[in-house]
């Protein structure tokens, strides 16, 4: 089991690139961090709508796979509190990633020059 392709919004892509530069990590790790942040700050399903824009970025298949995917799937089901089919699961996964990216951007913009961003996101 693994994730399917998902389309990240243009704004989400720009935020993801900033996060990658700040954390000095690769894209798959940044996507997982964004998802973890999004699900940790959520209280139920994400209700915000994120506009796509022209330059969407495709989150490729198999970034989240095997045991990680199973864990993320159960975290989403637990957060949403309803059983989900594959389409709904991926829709919620993308929403949590988008929400996490925006929260990480806020953390990055609000940090002082002396703070380490990696410690702040924990």
Image: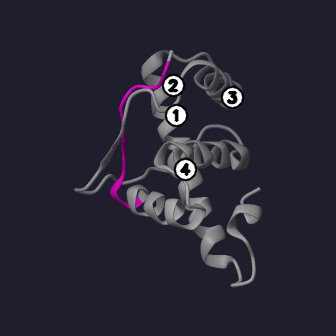
How far, Cα to Cα, is label 3 from label 2?
11 Å
Q: Earlier in the sequence, mark 4 or mark 1?
A: 4
Left or right, residue 65 beside residue 55? right
- Counting labels gives 4
Res 92 label: 1
Residue at x 62% of width, y 47% of height: 33
Relative height, residue 29 to residue 25 (above, below): above
How far, Cα to Cα, is label 1 from label 3?
11 Å
Q: Earlier in the sequence, mark 3 or mark 4?
A: 4
Say few, some or many: other residues with alpha carbon within 10 Å of mark 4 (under 14 / 14 to 19 / 20 or more). many
Residues at marks 1 and 2 touching, judged by CB atoms closer than 8 Å: yes
Which residue carries the number 3 mark? 75
Q: Which residues are magenta?
A: 2-11
Res 89 label: 2
Which residue carries the number 4 mark? 30
Residue at x 61% of width, y 61% of height: 104
Residue 10 position in % (x across, y down): 33, 57
Say few, some or many: other residues with alpha carbon within 10 Å of mark 3 (under 14 / 14 to 19 / 20 or more). some
Q: Earlier in the sequence, mark 4 or mark 2?
A: 4
Per the image, label 1 sits on a secondary structure element best described as helix
Say few, some or many: other residues with alpha carbon within 10 Å of mark 1 (under 14 / 14 to 19 / 20 or more). many
Of badges 1 and 3, nearer the viewer stands 3
Residue 10 highlighted magenta (yes or no): yes
Per the image, label 2 sits on a secondary structure element best described as helix
Left or right, residue 102 beside residue 39? left
Res 29 label: none
Relative height, residue 1 to residue 37 (above, below): above
Of badges 3 and 4, nearer the viewer stands 4
Relative height, residue 47 to residue 23 (above, below): above
Residue 28 position in % (x across, y down): 50, 42
């Amino acid at each position: 089991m693994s994730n399917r392709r998902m389309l990240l919004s243009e704004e989400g892509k720009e935020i993801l690139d900033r996060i990658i530069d700040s954390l000095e990590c690769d894209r798959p790790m940044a996507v997982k961090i964004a998802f973890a942040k999004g699900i940790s700050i959520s209280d139920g399903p994400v209700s915000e709508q994120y506009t796509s824009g022209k330059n969407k970025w495709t989150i490729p298949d198999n970034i989240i796979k095997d045991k990680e995917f199973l864990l993320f799937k159960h975290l989403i089901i637990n957060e949403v509190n309803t059983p989900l089919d594959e389409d709904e699961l991926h829709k919620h996964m993308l929403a949590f990633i988008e929400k996490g990216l925006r929260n990480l951007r806020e953390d990055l913009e609000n940090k002082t020059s002396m703070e380490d961003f990696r410690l702040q996101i924990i």
